Image (cartoon, rainbow, N blue to C red):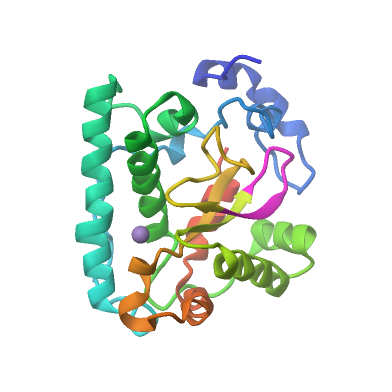
């Protein structure tokens, strides 16, 4: 199967209306690429640039669940370095940085480890910042809520599965709620700065919610208590971001 480009998707988009397993018109092209070595299709409006975007809230905004010092170091040092190094790798490897980083992630096996670590790290953090909001925002609603109930039985069961993935990821990595190619929600986790958009990912899909479980994300406040960090993450989840990504097409 050849990689699907945007114009192919437009041509196929009429088919998307028949894909209603979870009650939504979903992405037939994306679906067809499930669990293959082919790139995972990402809707156009979800594309991520190579530059770091503004955080969108103050470093103090997620206190007390995520402390200001951690937020500042995480955003200005760690995440900023992934963006800078991804752009360096792009220059060295002939990648056009005016194109989305998702294009590179989908074919990451063709690039260097520097690109894998930094383009992955950049994408992961850009999503992570937008997965959180001051005070969180309530609960998933509407179609997202229906899909969570359908896929996991309940929101609590989804949270438990996600939290377990985050707590048991050995060493550094991420936990994910993803939309898989078979139009279902699923939980996965990846090591290092890998993510489910990568052609090398064990479980592929569109990341809807991501949690950074590198020690740099929690050590100043929580030290070795990753489980407590994971539990408190739920208090700041921005369900609007999750819903927006879920409902995009
Ligand atoms: Mn991080």
Query: Which of the image's four quarters has the N terminus?
Result: top right
Q: Is residue 94 above or below residue 240?
A: above
Percent across and percent down for residue 226 are 48, 76
Residue nearest the observer in this picture, 236 or 227: 227
Q: Give whichever of 147, 80 is nearer the camera.
A: 80
Q: Residue 213 appears at what percent x and percent y?
A: 45, 65
In this rendering, position of residue 78 left or right of residue 218: left
Position of the C terminus, as image quadrant, is: top right
- Is 20 above or below relative to 133? above
Is residue 51 in sight in this rendering?
no
Q: Position of residue 188 (x, y in %)?
A: 62, 54
* 179 displayed left or right of 153: left
Q: Give the number of callouts.
A: 0
Q: Is residue 79 magenta?
A: no
Q: Residue at image x 48%, y 72%?
A: 137
Residue drawn at x 69%, y 52% as measured from the top left:
185
Q: Is residue 25 visible?
A: yes
Quadrant for ligand 1? bottom left
Q: Is residue 184 magenta?
A: yes
From the viewer's perspective, tell me whether residue 43 is left or right of residue 159: left
Q: Is residue 7 above or below residue 148?
A: above
Q: What's drawn in magenta, residue-wise?
A: 179-189
Q: Position of residue 174 (x, y in %)?
A: 49, 57
């Amino acid at each position: 199967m050849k990689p699907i480009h945007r114009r192919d998707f437009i041509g196929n988009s009429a088919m998307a209306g028949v894909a209603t397993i979870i009650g939504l018109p979903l992405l037939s092209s994306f679906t067809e690429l499930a669990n293959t070595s082919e790139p995972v299709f990402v809707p156009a409006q979800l594309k991520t640039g190579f530059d770091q975007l503004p955080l969108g809230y103050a470093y103090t905004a997620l206190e007390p669940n995520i402390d200001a010092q951690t937020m500042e170091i995480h955003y200005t040092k760690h995440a900023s370095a992934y963006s800078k190094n991804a752009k360096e790798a792009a220059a060295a490897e002939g990648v056009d940085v005016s194109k989305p980083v998702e294009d590179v992630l989908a074919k990451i096996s063709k690039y260097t480890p520097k690109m894998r670590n930094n383009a992955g790290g950049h994408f992961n953090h850009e999503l992570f910042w937008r997965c959180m909001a001051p005070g969180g925002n309530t609960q998933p609603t509407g179609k997202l809520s229906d899909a969570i109930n359908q896929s996991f039985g309940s929101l609590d069961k989804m949270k438990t599965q996600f939290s377990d993935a985050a707590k048991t990821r050995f060493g550094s990595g991420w936990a994910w709620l993803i939309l898989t190619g078979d139009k279902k929600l699923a939980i996965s986790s990846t090591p290092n700065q890998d993510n489910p958009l990568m052609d090398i990912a064990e479980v592929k899909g569109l990341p809807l919610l991501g949690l950074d479980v590198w020690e740099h994300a929690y050590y100043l406040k929580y030290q070795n208590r990753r489980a407590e960090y994971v539990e408190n993450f739920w208090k700041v989840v921005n369900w609007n971001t999750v819903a927006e990504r879920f409902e995009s097409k």
